[in-house]
Every structure is written in C-alpha cells, then in structure tokens.
Amino acid sequence: MLRGEHVMARLLRGRLVPHRLSPDDEHAREVAGTLVNLYTSHLGKARAELEEELSLLEEELGPRLDARRGFKILRGLAKLLEERSEWAPPTEADPYTLRTRLFELSATLPELPLATGNLLKGGTREDVLARVSTETGIENPVALMYADRQGAQLLAGFDPPSAKALISRYNVAQVQGVLYSARDLTVDLGSDADARLVFHYVKLLGLIYTLEPTPKGHRLRLDGPLSLFGGTRKYGLRLAKLLPGLLLTAPWTLHANVSWKGREASLELTSETPGLASHYKGLSDTGEADVRGAFRKAWERAKDKGEWEIEEGTGVIPVPPLKAALVPDFAFRNAATNESVYLEILGFWSERYLVERATLLREAAKRGHRILVAAPESLGASVETLSEATRGYVIPFKSRLDAKSVLAALGGKDTSEATMEG
C-alpha cells in the first residue's frame, strides 16, 4: 500500500475524491509500462542503481502525467512495484564483521607521520587486506565492507504486473490511503452480494463491526482507526485491506466519514465506481495471520473433547429486537445432548464494542442461541476492562485461542480459570 506522502485526494463540497489514473490514458499506460520494464531490467543489480534511474524518470515522465504532481504519482507507482520486489544482500558474508576486522587491524598499526598520507595506502593497505582475505576467504574485502547498506541490495526477484494492473492497483491504493483517516465506515451489501465473502475478510482482518439485516441485504458498520485510542496505525492498515476483498463482489455502496487534513469529509464509493479492481487472488492475500485456522488445528489436536464436535459457522444469526445480527465462526454440537453452541472470534475491540456484544449475546440467548465470544488481549484494552465490560461473556486469549479455554466455556465453567496459551 501507499505511504501517507503518496496519497492524494480533492475535497469537493465536503466529499473526498481520491486521485485516480485512467487505464485508458495513453500517457498513464506508457509511464506504468516504463516503470515495470525498469524493474525487470534491473534484476540482479543494486538498489542504488535502480533508485538513480527512478529519479531521472521522475523528471522525464512525471510532467506527462501531471505538470505539478507527476513526480508524486511516479513515486506512488514505484512504491507499489517495490511491494512486488524481493531484495537480497550481495554476499553471504557479514559486512559488519568484515569492516570491524579491517578497522581493528588498522588500529594496531603504528601511527605514521602526516606527510606519508593515508595509512592504508601502498604495502600497509595491502597487508591488512590480504590478512582479512585469508581469515575470511573473501577475495576483495573492500568491495563488501558496506554490503549491508540498503543501496547495495540486489534485486533478486520481481513479479511484473501489466501496465493496466499497476494502474488499477494504484487507484485502489489511493482509496485505501484515504481510509487510514476514517472515523467510521458503512457498507450496504445488496442481496446478490457475496456477504459470506465479505464477512470472511472482516473476520480475518479483525475489524470492529456491527451487522444489521436490511430489506435489500445487510448493512455493515465498521469502526475506523480514528475511533480508537490505541493501535490506530495497525488497525488502519487492516481496514484498508478490506477494500480489495469488497471489490470481489457486487452490488454494494460504501460511505466513510474521514478526517482529512484537519477537515471533516466523506468518501462515497459503489461497486460500479470506475477504475477500481481487486488484486486479491485468494482469501489469504491480506497477509494477516488466520486466528481461526490456527484454532481449528488446535481443536483437532486436542485429545479430550468430550462429546463436542466442531462445525463451520452457520451463517448469520439475526437478533431482531436489537436490529442487529451475529456471524459465528464455528458451531459446536454435543453428540450426547444435541445441544448447539456458536463461537465468534473477535479481532480488535474496545470496551464499548464488548459491552454492545454482551448485550447481543444476552438477547440471542433469549431466542435460544448460545453464543460464545473470544477476544485477544493484545488488540484491545486491559484484561480488567475486558472482564468488567463483558461480565464473563467473553473468553480472553493471548496470541492463540486454545481448545482448553473453549471446552471450559462449552462446559459452562468460568473461562477465566482456563489455561491460556501465549
């Protein structure tokens, strides 16, 4: 994704319009193609050489895109290509150890008069280099003294996109950059939209959400990074990663309240907004750890599970009195009693969110649905706040949710007494 200095948007009558390149623009395609070719041609070469070429291209190609902001657009495109690049050191040797040894040997040499010039010139220099070369097996130590500098890295791999794909990725990244400054986000999913796919991304990214059934589908409300007191950068990145997942389905409309350069504004998008296409190829493309997958494996490894059997979540559970709904991740069925219990695993959370969740759980229980909720201690407030806010309705866990804690909750035991794995 783009850094803050790459993100551009216009504010028109209170509405933000993120910067966008047209895939049909000849100049845009030319610039995108040139950048892709530049990276491709620099495979095996040093980063410093590539960065020097990029600087020259900013002056040459930037004005063709935009007389004032062309250089900024090029840097944004290059940042996205950087994400598709793999860099490697030019040597397996440790440059820090190498230069430290060179300096140590140089320091032991007798001090020469200033008139003689550089201490490491002539035979003295060659003696030191020869000794280090013998000790390390490196033929030319001087050439690798600073091989750990970023500019010395070699481009070891590059996944080249088409010019059109790069432009599309740039357009999506500009919208994602605006979402870093969102206070809240509302997505209205039409009845034909793949709601389960969207819920998957919301869960995988650990976003704070509420769900409301509507006559036309579902309304998804998400907290923005500016609504949290802590962890805003990490949460903002995760919220931005939802957009490519949302672009995999239709129809939907999106409204976000954004704080943009000290002013309140709104962002409006629909599944028909031109120039936007997802670059996700699978459900794991977000790069986030799958807490649910890890729990499933932990459950399968657990030995004493009693009569409890695990199933995948059974979709949306509506709670009409509160005009809300729940989306469990798993269902458990007791083979002996035929009792069913659901489990929802949260990501980020706040005290307010957990209090609202606890209210939903109580209301769902009145309608015959027993639902457990697990929340990570690391992505919210303190453990004391967690316990006080939910009054025991939530299973706390650290980095991983273990089967023992869930089994204790299924049995109706106090979850705080269950052992939590780190």
Image (cartoon, rainbow, N blue to C red):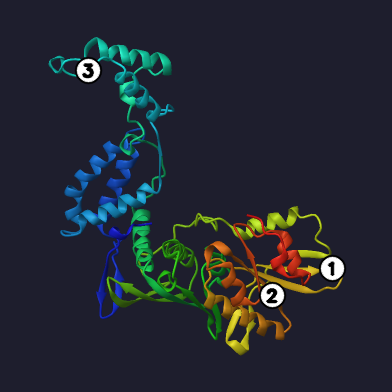
Q: Which residue is the site of mark 3?
A: 119
Q: Is residue 126 left or right of residue 139?
A: left
User: Which residue is at the front of the view, 360 or 110?
Assistant: 110
User: Which residue is at the front of the view, 87 or 137?
Assistant: 137
> Could you say whether the residue bearing mark 2 is in a helix, strand or loop?
strand
Mark 1 / mark 2, whichever is N-terminal: 1
Q: Where's residue 9, x and y in %?
A: 28, 68
Occupied quadrant, residue 331:
bottom right
Q: Where's residue 356, x and y in %?
A: 57, 80
3D distance between C-alphas at marks 3 and 1:
83 Å
Specify the amino acid type for callout 3. Leu
Q: Which residue is the site of mark 1?
A: 335
3D distance between C-alphas at marks 1 and 2:
18 Å
Residue at 84% across / 65% down in the picture? 307
Badges 1 and 2: C-beta atoms under 8 Å apart? no
Specify the amino acid type for callout 1. Ala
Q: Is residue 227 left or right of residue 46?
A: right
Mark 3 / mark 1, whichever is N-terminal: 3
Residue 371, labelled with which disc?
A: 2
- Residue 220 visible in this rendered orientation of the protein: yes
Specify the amino acid type for callout 2. Ile
Nearer the observer: mark 2 or 3; the answer is 3
Occupied quadrant, residue 137:
top left
* Residue 103 versus residue 233 in the image, above or below: above
Residue at 31% across / 17% down in the picture? 108
